[in-house]
Amino acid sequence: MTKIKKIGVLTSGGDAPGMNAAVRAVVRTSVYKNIECFGIYKGYQGMIEGLIKKLNARSVNNIINKGGTVLKTARCVEFYKKEGREKAYNKIKEFEIDALVIIGGDGSFTGAIHFNKEYNIPVIGIPGTIDNDISGTSFTIGYDTALNTVVESIDKIRDTAISHNRLFIVEVMGRDAGHIALNAGIGGGAEEILIPEEDMGLERLLDSLKKSQKSGKSSSIIMVAEGDKTGKNVFEIASYVENNMPEYEVRVSVLGHIQRGGSPSCFDRVLASRMGVHAIDTLLNGTYNVMVGIKDDMMVLSPLEEAIKGQTEINKDLIRVSEILSI
Ligand code: F6P
């Protein structure tokens, strides 16, 4: 195995608050350990196009507090194909890059696995996605910030919901995972939470709203994850409720991409910093093709294949807590 002297770092897939803190940690740890570090811009697309620049400790000044990613990001369809990956390999060879740190979610890690198999380039994954849907870590970078953004939004929606005695249906991100909906739903005091992992059924939703109404509630908030199991979008759910409970005035609020923006929380900054340092330590210790994660406040490693496998588990206790507290 050749000694690693030059590392490339990129962010890929949907951006997440805290990605900059991770980039900063990767760059500074590389410099600290006398390794050259190259920023690859626009994710895998930038690898194909050769958007690569050497970074030093000062290149990452004043970014720990910034949302988004200074390296930019993309969802790169060309990298799914062998020809795209070949172009990317040729580019990183021009820069003599020996190893890669990939900050992203499951799609980004799938690309990394293919790339490693074809070209034997050591890769390390750092989980960065607001969805928290990666196995092998209790938390992904950006999740905590997104939760706080959602809770802040729910608090604001609640003010207007109470003032008008309205029912609000709020859609949050999570195509395949209900972690944001469930946790921010409990944190924001939502009456009902619809997630992709559990089929709550629309009938049950009506029953529960009727009970709430009977017990004196005049306004309610229903949290819905993008990919919830009812198979209906928030506007269809709103019509369903309005048709069955005409006494309710229903409004829909889709929080959308505000959930991905904003300054990272302290939790995400510390998590990203730890993961960045650990990623370089791991590479230099000769362990490759793994993802850095956190469990019980300890840095842990798991094979990249494991990280992208299946769905992450929903904590059933949260469902129970929400049911009890939303009476
Ligand atoms: O994967 C993160 C995520 O924010 C999902 O929750 C959401 O479904 C998706 O990205 C949106 O992606 P895009 O910004 O490409 O529309």
Image (tube, rainbow, N blue to C red):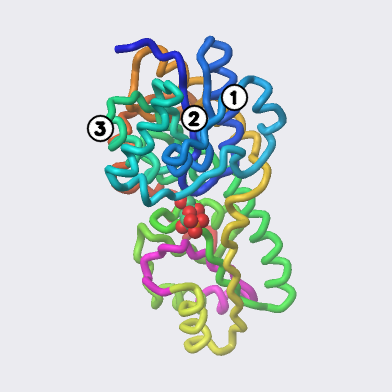
Characterize the local packing of mark 2: few (<14), some (14-19) or many (20 or more) Cα atoms within 10 angstroms: many
Q: Amino acid at mark 3?
A: Glu
Residue 107 drawn above or below residue 182:
above
Mark sitting earlier along the chain (3/1): 1
Q: Position of residue 208 (x, y in %)?
A: 47, 73
Residue 255, picture quadrant: bottom right
Asked whether residue 182 is in view, the answer is no
Labels in figure, total: 3
Q: Is residue 214 magenta?
A: yes
Residue displayed at 41% across by 32% down: 91
Residue displayed at 60% across by 27% down: 24
Q: Amino acid at mark 1?
A: Leu
Residue 55, numbered label: 1
Asked whether residue 164 is in view, the answer is yes
Q: Position of residue 263 (x, y in %)?
A: 68, 42
Q: Position of residue 289 (x, y in %)?
A: 33, 27
Residue 34 drawn above or below residue 99:
above
The one nearer the camera, 290 or 198, is 290
